[in-house]
């Protein structure tokens, strides 16, 4: 089967890889001149990389880990100590850790929480532990049912003091979806906690050893091409043409050199949900599974890169800033081999929530980030020789991953659609890993399986 796929993010590339593995011919069309979508990255004039987002891989990413193993690049993940590290606001320049001992789950997670003395009090730990019992006992069905609540509402329902939000869950909620606990669906936080507590290595983190387009997406493209598929850049899907039965007759592509109509046996949108909504043919909006897409939309986020004249940290890990403006950050000169600098820090910081900042100038954003950093590391920015910022880069994504607010789980479409020859891939489609790289990879795999299944149900014509 020839399958036209719009979008070369992780979902589109994973779909193409699994279709090619199954003997089909995928042809991927990407609008931009860079692979990876939300994991895209670029080199500046000095040869330094900057990225759409600071990306961390988790032990609880089975499909991503399997994909990397299949591509023969599992060694490109740089695994870090099994711990979660938070900045301590009350003692600037110091950290509070949740260290996971080498014990089976959930004992290692429980030990990590109990041994942390800085952030939560004993009564808070007990109240929180009791609150989690239904999620652990009843599993995913309970977790899904909690989609009617925000995380803050869920805490209140369980009589858990809201101070645990200030201490831990503002940071976690911003890391998961770039929004605060009063906005994020309880399902998202509970899903993450469940995986972290139920899988021994679930919360262990790794960084890729370089820029994702080169180190992760290119091997996917090589694998697709080696099995007869194609990946074409600078080719945006411009419109979806329908036949008399309301099925897809072809993809109209834009881009340099003018339009082109693409015909295939099956068609896939691996676009972000906001881009798909702009291209959805009018008659399809009558169908409930497409109509529900109206309730899904991307959340703004900003990724800030700061290059300093010296080392600010020696932490080889992701750090939760617990700052009002910032989410997680890392010193990429330490955590990522490809960005290594033995003498100077390059901090990559996720700026979230970003809704009030996405329209502001890069200068304003850098200034606000630096003010936050001065709170986190006062020693480096005071005295006679304060650390100097050598250069900076701001990458804004006004519509990034879909916003996981209460009620959005039931809006997420499956990979097979009511249109027999049209399929969906993307982190926003139904899969249990929410808006993540793992979710994107799994959605692509599920989409490839749905296409395979459709072929078995109805033998298709070849164009
Ligand atoms: C700042 C930030 C930090 C993140 N951190 C993490 C993390 O630490 N861990 C984690 O697991 N996940 C993280 N994520 C989430 C993760 O990046 C996404 O969930 C995942 O990459 C989404 O992949 P996708 O293929 O579904 O969508 P996308 O990556 O958005 O891919 C869609 C592709 O479609 C293309 N496209 C758009 N319109 C058209 C068109 N008309 N024609 C053709 N192509 C088109 C786009 O250019 C893009 O390449 C982060 C995201 C951001 C933004």
Image (spheres, helix red, strand yellow):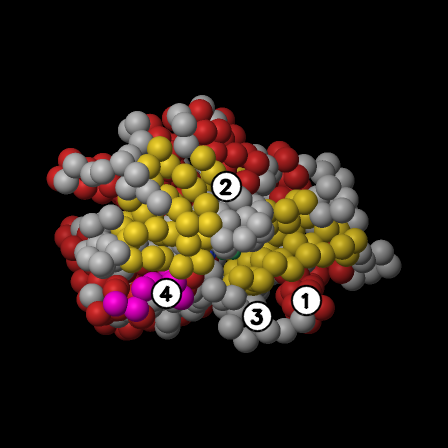
Q: Which residues are magenta?
A: 276-283
Q: Secondary structure at mark 2?
A: strand
- Using the image, tell me which numbered label, if any, was put on residue 232: 2
Is ligand 1 within 8 Å of the beta carbon of the residue shown at mark 3?
A: no
Q: Residues within 10 Å of mark 1 (few under 14, many from 20)?
A: some
Q: Residue at x 26, y 56 (%)?
A: 243
Select label 1 or label 2 by which is in front: 2
Looking at the image, can residue 226 be seen? Answer: yes
Select label 4 or label 2 by which is in front: 2
Q: Would residue 253 be counted in the magenta stretch?
A: no
Point out residue 434 in the picture as x, y percentages from the top left corner.
Answer: 33, 54
Q: Give the side of residue 18 with respect to residue 132, left or right.
A: right
Q: Secondary structure at mark 1?
A: helix
Nearer to the camera, 400 or 308: 400
Image quadrant where one finds the C terminus: top left
Select label 3 or label 2 by which is in front: 2
Point out residue 71 in the picture as x, y percentages from the top left corner.
Answer: 43, 27
Q: Disc 4 to disc 2, how far (Cα)?
A: 22 Å
Q: Residues within 10 Å of mark 3 (few under 14, many from 20)?
A: some
The residue under label 1 is 362
Nearer to the camera, 304 or 67: 67
Q: Disc 3 to disc 2, how far (Cα)?
A: 31 Å
Q: Give the side of residue 367 with respect to residue 401, left or right.
A: right
- Using the image, tell me which numbered label, if any, was put on residue 358: 3
The residue under label 4 is 277
Q: Secondary structure at mark 3?
A: loop
Looking at the image, can residue 124 be seen? Answer: no
Question: Mark 3 or mark 2: which comes first in sequence?
Answer: 2
Q: Residue at x 38, y 52 (%)?
A: 251
């Amino acid at each position: 089967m020839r399958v036209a796929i719009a979008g070369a993010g992780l979902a589109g590339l994973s779909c193409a890889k699994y279709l090619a593995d199954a003997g089909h011919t995928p042809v991927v069309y990407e609008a931009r001149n860079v692979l990876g979508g939300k994991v895209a990255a670029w080199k500046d004039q000095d040869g330094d990389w900057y990225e759409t987002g600071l990306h961390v891989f988790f032990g609880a990413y089975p499909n991503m880990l399997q994909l990397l193993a299949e591509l023969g690049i599992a060694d490109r993940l740089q695994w870090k100590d099994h711990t979660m590290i938070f900045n301590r606001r009350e003692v600037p320049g110091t950290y509070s850790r949740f260290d996971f001992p080498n014990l089976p789950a959930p004992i290692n997670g429980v030990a990590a929480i109990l041994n942390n003395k800085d952030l939560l009090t004993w009564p808070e730990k007990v109240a929180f532990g009791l609150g989690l019992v239904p999620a652990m006992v009843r599993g995913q069905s309970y977790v899904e049912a909690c989609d009617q609540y925000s995380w803050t509402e869920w805490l209140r329902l369980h009589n858990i003091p809201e101070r645990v939000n200030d201490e831990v869950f503002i940071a976690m909620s911003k890391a998961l979806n770039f929004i605060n606990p009063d906005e994020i669906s309880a399902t998202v936080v509970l899903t993450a906690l469940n995986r972290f507590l139920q899988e021994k290595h679930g919360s262990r983190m790794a960084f890729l050893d370089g820029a994702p387009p080169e180190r992760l997406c290119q091997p996917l493209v090589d694998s697709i091409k080696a099995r007869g598929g194609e990946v074409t850049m600078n080719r945006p899907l411009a419109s979806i043409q329908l036949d008399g039965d309301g099925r897809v007759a072809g993809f109209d592509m834009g881009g340099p050199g003018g339009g082109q109509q693409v015909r295939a046996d099956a068609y896939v949108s691996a676009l972000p949900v906001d881009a798909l909504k702009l291209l959805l043919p009018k008659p399809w909006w009558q169908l409930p599974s497409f109509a529900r897409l109206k309730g899904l939309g991307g959340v703004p986020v900003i990724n800030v890169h700061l290059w300093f004249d010296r080392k600010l940290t020696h932490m080889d890990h992701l750090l939760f800033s617990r700052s009002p403006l910032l989410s997680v950050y890392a010193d990429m000169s330490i955590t990522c081999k490809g960005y290594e600098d033995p003498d100077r820090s390059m901090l990559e910081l996720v700026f979230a929530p970003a809704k009030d900042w996405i329209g502001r100038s890069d200068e304003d954003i850098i200034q606000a980030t630096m003010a936050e950093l001065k709170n986190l590391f006062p020693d480096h920015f005071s005295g006679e020789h304060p650390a100097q910022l050598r250069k900076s880069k701001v990458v804004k994504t006004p519509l990034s991953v879909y916003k996981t607010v209460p009620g959005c789980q039931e809006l997420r479409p499956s990979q097979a659609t009511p249109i027999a020859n049209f399929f969906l891939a993307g982190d926003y489609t139904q899969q249990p890993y929410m808006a993540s790289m793992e979710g994107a990879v799994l959605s692509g795999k599920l989409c490839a399986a749905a296409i395979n299944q459709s072929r078995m149900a109805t033998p298709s014509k070849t164009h």
